[in-house]
Image: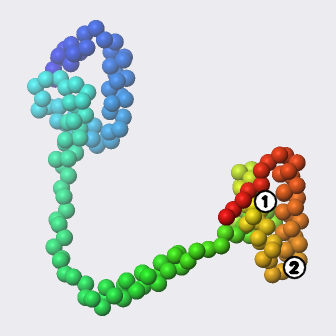
């Protein structure tokens, strides 16, 4: 198309390095954008630089974009519909505003089950999180507030073992406010 004009842009440079530079510069473009850029080259009277070619690829894409017609429906909702929807929204959001007590019962249940909900073994990261939760004040509170004495005894044995292991290893016990 331009003969040696393209190669003369880099007379002393290593063409391998130029190819690497262009590959890195163009790797974010889709094949559709690259094709649009190549199609636009026919209109140029000179060999483009990397940034000029990139702009050609992006410009062609922008020109091909046809925006959708703007919405023309400007009707307003009736006040009773708005009030009903706001009431429903408040009803849905209300439980999220209630402060919850921090509990670690999930950790006891997970450890007693011995596997994830999908049946896969617990990872070391999950086990560390579980033992941290059980060794915390929230873990103690689960035992204190458990209505089932047998289950509370099982929880106590688990917590005592974990706390003893933490102390043996010199790890700090977690505290949850």
Q: Is residue 137 above or below residue 29?
A: below
Q: Residue at x 65, y 73 (%)?
A: 101
Instruction: Give the image location of residue 146, x and y in percent.
Output: 80, 77
Q: Nearer the viewer, residue 124 or 169?
A: 169
Using the image, tell me which numbered label, if any, was put on residue 54: none
Q: Residue at x 33, y 30 (%)?
A: 25
Tag 2 secondary structure: helix
Give the quadrant of residue 6: top left
* Residue 3 placement, left or right of 15: left
Q: Residue at x 31, y 11 (%)?
A: 13
Q: Residues within 10 Å of mark 2 (few under 14, many from 20)?
A: few
Residue at the extreme bottom: 80
Report the quarter where the N terminus lies: top left
Tag 1 secondary structure: helix
Q: Is residue 12 above or below residue 66?
A: above
Report the quarter where the C terminus lies: bottom right
Q: For mark 1, what is the residue?
A: 135
Q: Residue at x 85, y 46 (%)?
A: 169
Residue 130: in sight, yes or no?
no
Q: Spatial distance from mark 1 to mark 2, Cα to Cα?
A: 20 Å
Give the quadrant of residue 78: bottom left
* Residue 62 placement, left or right of 171: left
Q: Nearer the viewer, residue 29 or 127?
A: 127
Instruction: Give the image location of residue 120, x and y in percent.
Output: 73, 58
Q: For mark 2, what is the residue?
A: 149
Q: Earlier in the sequence, mark 1 or mark 2?
A: 1
């Amino acid at each position: 198309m331009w003969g040696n004009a393209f190669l003369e842009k880099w007379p002393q440079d290593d063409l391998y390095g130029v190819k690497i530079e262009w590959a890195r510069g163009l790797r974010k473009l889709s094949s559709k954008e690259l094709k649009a850029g190549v199609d636009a080259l026919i209109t140029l009277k000179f060999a483009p630089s990397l940034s000029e070619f990139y702009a050609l690829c992006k410009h062609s894409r922008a020109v091909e974009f046809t925006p959708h017609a703007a919405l023309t429906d400007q009707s307003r909702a009736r006040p009773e519909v708005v009030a009903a929807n706001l009431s429903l929204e408040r009803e849905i959001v209300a439980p999220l505003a209630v402060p919850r007590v921090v509990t670690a019962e999930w950790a006891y249940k997970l450890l007693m089950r011995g596997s994830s909900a999908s049946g896969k073994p617990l990872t070391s990261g999950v086990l560390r999180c579980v033992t941290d939760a059980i060794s915390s004040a929230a873990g103690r509170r689960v035992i204190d507030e458990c209505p089932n004495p047998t289950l509370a005894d099982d929880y106590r044995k688990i917590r005592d073992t974990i706390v003893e292991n933490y102390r043996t290893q010199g790890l700090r016990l977690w505290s949850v406010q």
